[in-house]
């Protein structure tokens, strides 16, 4: 079975702008409040593509709608593709020429590694992720999928879904997945569904950068009917849990209509609105530094 929501043709992907099925998201994934930020005293204005207030996933000109260079990589233990592109100074409103590589590598151990690396010639916020929609059955909803996560907190947000800066303990709330439970058990208490940034064990505290060389277990997704399991490890401090709350009625692969909660996205990332939150782990990449974000999805059955 195909365990990813998406489309059958390229034009369908292009026309479904805003859903980002299976695509790279950047320059800055998730939201930036007020569609602006300041670095070293200089203010930058971005696209207001989220309710005409915030920037979401980089703005109107998203990096999943541009042409990337591609190189196939094939070894004795894995195969994959490395995409590369220069995002020019001022693209999406962000400063700096940003040289980006995105690699997808599938190993013989059934692990899919996604790695994002970037360098810049000016200080600039960087936050890449992938917006894959997983359904381990391949159809229907994911409400009977079991999810377990070592994330013990999530970011409180305001009415515009911008973090307040406060981390909420999941204990005793519908957001608690520290012990495995079905996604559907408490989803009715979180209408219209989960769409929250959880704090992974990579988080080291206020304004502290996580260790880029250390991967932590962020989530385990399991479907009891098929016996399929997916693990997620990352070096990022945040992971967005999103239960496909707004895909109902879209045409999916082979013409099949999508349903509400037909998938779950587990998007590793920096914290949303980090450019405007000095207490959040740093997200600004500076010249001579290297951005290096890694996420590994492991599959078994």
Image: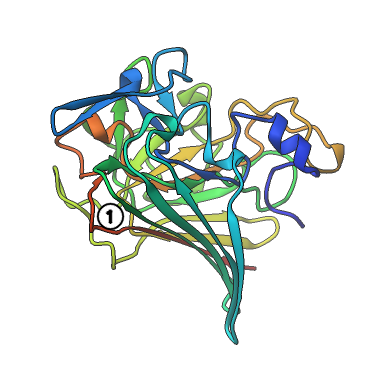
Viewer-closest of 164 and 140? 164
Q: Position of residue 258 (x, y in %)?
A: 74, 33
Q: Nearer the viewer, residue 245 or 13?
A: 13
- Which quarter of the image is occupied by the N terminus? bottom right
Q: Tell me, yes or no, if residue 293 can be seen here.
A: yes
Nearer-the-camera pick, 164 or 149: 164
Relative image position of residue 117 (x, y in whole percent): 39, 58
Residue 68 coordinates in the image, percent (x, y):
58, 52
Graded by Cα atoms within 10 Å as few (under 14), some (14 to 19) or many (20 or more), the crowding at tag 1 reads many
Question: Can you say which quadrant of the picture contains the C terminus?
Answer: bottom right
Task: Indicate left or right for 60 with 292 as reference.
Answer: right
Rendering quarter of residue 255 = top right
Residue 143 visible? The answer is: no
Mark 1: which secondary structure? loop
Residue at (38, 29) in percent of width and height? 93
Q: x and y percent of residue 194 in the render?
A: 48, 32
Q: How many marks?
A: 1
Label 1, on which residue? 201
Q: Which quadrant of the view contains residue 259?
A: top right
User: Residue at 61% of width from left, 38% of height from top?
Assistant: 65
Q: Farthest residue toward the bottom?
A: 76
Above or below, comparing residue 211 to residue 268 in the picture:
below
């Amino acid at each position: 079975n195909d365990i990813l929501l998406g489309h059958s043709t390229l034009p369908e992907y292009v026309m479904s702008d805003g859903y980002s099925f299976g695509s790279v998201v950047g320059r800055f994934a998730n939201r930036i409040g007020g569609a602006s930020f300041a670095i070293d005293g200089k203010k930058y204005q971005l696209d207001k593509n989220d309710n005409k207030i915030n920037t979401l996933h980089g703005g109107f000109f998203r990096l999943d709608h541009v042409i990337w260079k591609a190189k196939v990589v094939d070894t004795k233990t894995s195969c994959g593709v490395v995409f590369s592109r220069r995002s020019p100074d001022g693209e999406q409103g962000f400063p700096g020429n940003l040289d980006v590589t995105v690699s997808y590598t599938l190993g013989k151990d059934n692990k899919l590694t996604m790695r994002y690396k970037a360098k810049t010639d000016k200080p600039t916020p960087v936050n890449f992720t992938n917006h894959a929609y997983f359904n381990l059955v391949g159809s229907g909803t994911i409400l009977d999928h079991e999810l377990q996560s070592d994330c013990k907190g999530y970011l409180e947000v305001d009415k515009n879904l911008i973090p307040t800066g406060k981390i909420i303990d999941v204990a005793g709330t519908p957001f608690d997945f520290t012990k495995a439970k079905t996604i559907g058990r408490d989803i009715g208490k979180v209408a219209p569904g989960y769409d929250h940034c959880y704090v992974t064990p990579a988080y080291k505290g206020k304004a502290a950068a996580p260790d880029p060389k250390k991967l932590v277990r962020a989530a385990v997704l399991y479907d009891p009917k098929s016996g399929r399991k997916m693990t997620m490890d990352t070096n990022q401090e945040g992971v967005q849990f999103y239960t496909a709350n707004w895909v109902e009625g879209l045409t999916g692969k082979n013409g099949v209509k999508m349903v509400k909660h037909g998938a779950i996205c587990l998007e590793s990332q920096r914290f949303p609105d980090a450019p405007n939150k000095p207490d959040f782990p740093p997200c600004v990449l500076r010249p001579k530094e290297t951005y290096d974000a890694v996420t590994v999805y492991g599959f078994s059955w």
